[in-house]
Image (cartoon, rainbow, N blue to C red):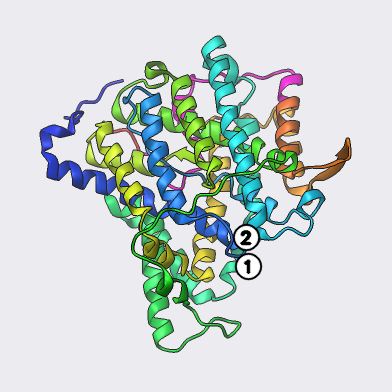
Amino acid sequence: MSKNFDAIRDARTLGVPRMLLLGLQHMFAMFGATILVPILVNSYFQGEGLSIQVTLFFAGIGTLFFHVCSKLKVPAFLGSSFAFLGGFATVAELDTGIFAGMTYGEKLPYACGGIVVAGLLYLILALVIKLVGVKRVMRFLPPVVTGPIIICIGLSLAPSAVNNASSNWFLAIIALAVIIVFNIWGKGMWKIIPILLGVVISYGAALIMNIAGFTNADGSAILDFSGVAVSSFAGLPPFQLCKFNLTAILVMAPIALATMMEHIGDISAISATVGENFIEDPGLHRTLIGDGLATSLSALFGGPANTTYGENTGVLELSGVYDPKVIRLAALYAIILSFIPKMSAIIGSLPSAIIGGVSFILYGMISAIGVRNIVENKVDFTKSRNLIIAAVILVCGLGFSGGLTFTVGGTSITLTSLAIAALAGIILNAILPGNDYTFGENPHGDINRGVSFNPQPKKKK
């Protein structure tokens, strides 16, 4: 891989002030999407979900940990993963077995426990890739399996988006419109942070409407600043230890199939962007270990899953500065912000209608990315095996809305629709003849495997 323009690989040549500004740019790129995950999860858990402070803390710590695992070579930022939103929504509504009678806040640690196990699955994949090679492993996880699974993740969340948006359609439409405008017509950095802009501009509209005396559809106030008033300017993030339950693990763990593919796609994209083959050096097994352990560490103390961010890959392309030290500066900024509770409280006052407007496009785009995964990898649906695999995954993922609950040794276990879909897809792909997918033959298709908001940047010529 090579670049025929002057890339900057040592940001120290730019001087400290410019390095600090470049780090700030990366922080803004990840910020909107990273904080959106705890905001959305809080809507599922009726305000008793993930902490924005904890999320920012482990986005920073996880990124630094990832850089250590990848020999400080890969300029990647680890932000909150959208792929696990469906799992959080499912755990929030569990009411069988030990979950019967639990409050939403009591269920959250079990969801985090499931993510800990999901992160550890990365280590298994890393070991297998180290032993047998990435091409052999990816044969069992082709786009005909991962694409439909990603489609199911997005579509399963669609009712939540409509429900939140319905509280104030005017605000929801503002948020939606701003994201569309900047994502389609934005230039430079504006194009890379459409979620952040959608949240900020629609929040400004909410402030004006609140001052003018407008209310939501149910008559409630558009904004509630009671939490902001009582929060302090400095304080520790509210860490909490996760808990483990087999049902919650079976909800969360299968989602790792999608996020591991996202990781491989993002590492491929970063490699193409900066002109280095990071899949070979430091090695995909090392980057998987870093991502997986960062995810498990975050969830262990009450944070969301982490994932490599396409948004920051876009900043690499925009700036032409490929020095990982700049990414590590952004990680330090995130850690500093995590110790400011008042900022988290302001973010937490975001109206549910704005959340609905943002997720209206976000959830749909997750599903659309699954479709892109299939299209870019040229999955041949004239073959019966591919039609059968995709059809079974989609029906299982969307049809088993309540999952399958059974009892083993007196313990109630629930297999969610996504777990059933993942198992069915992997098994069918393994036993049906005619699997012709080979990782690496279509690099552009392999890059487009992730559940990130922004499309991967185009390679400069």
Q: Looking at the image, can residue 270 be seen?
A: yes
Q: Quadrant of residue 84?
A: top right
| Relative to 403, 30 lies left or right | left
**The stretch drawn in magenta includes residue 437:** yes
User: Mark 2 = which residue?
Assistant: 45
Image position, residue 355 (x, y; %):
51, 64
Amino acid carrying label 2: it is: Phe
Q: Residue at x 51, y 59 (%)?
A: 39
Q: What residue does disc 1 label? A: 163
- Who's the residue at 54% across and 42% down the image? 299
Quick one: 127 or 271, which is closer to the camera?
A: 127
Query: What residue is rendered at 18% in x and 41% in y?
Result: 19
Secondary structure under tag 1 reads helix
- Which span is picked out in magenta? 429-457
Give the Cα distance between marks 2 and 1.
Answer: 14 Å
Q: Relative to residue 101, is residue 292 depicted above or below?
A: above
Q: Is residue 147 above or below residue 2?
A: below
Residue 10 percent coordinates (x, y): 18, 29
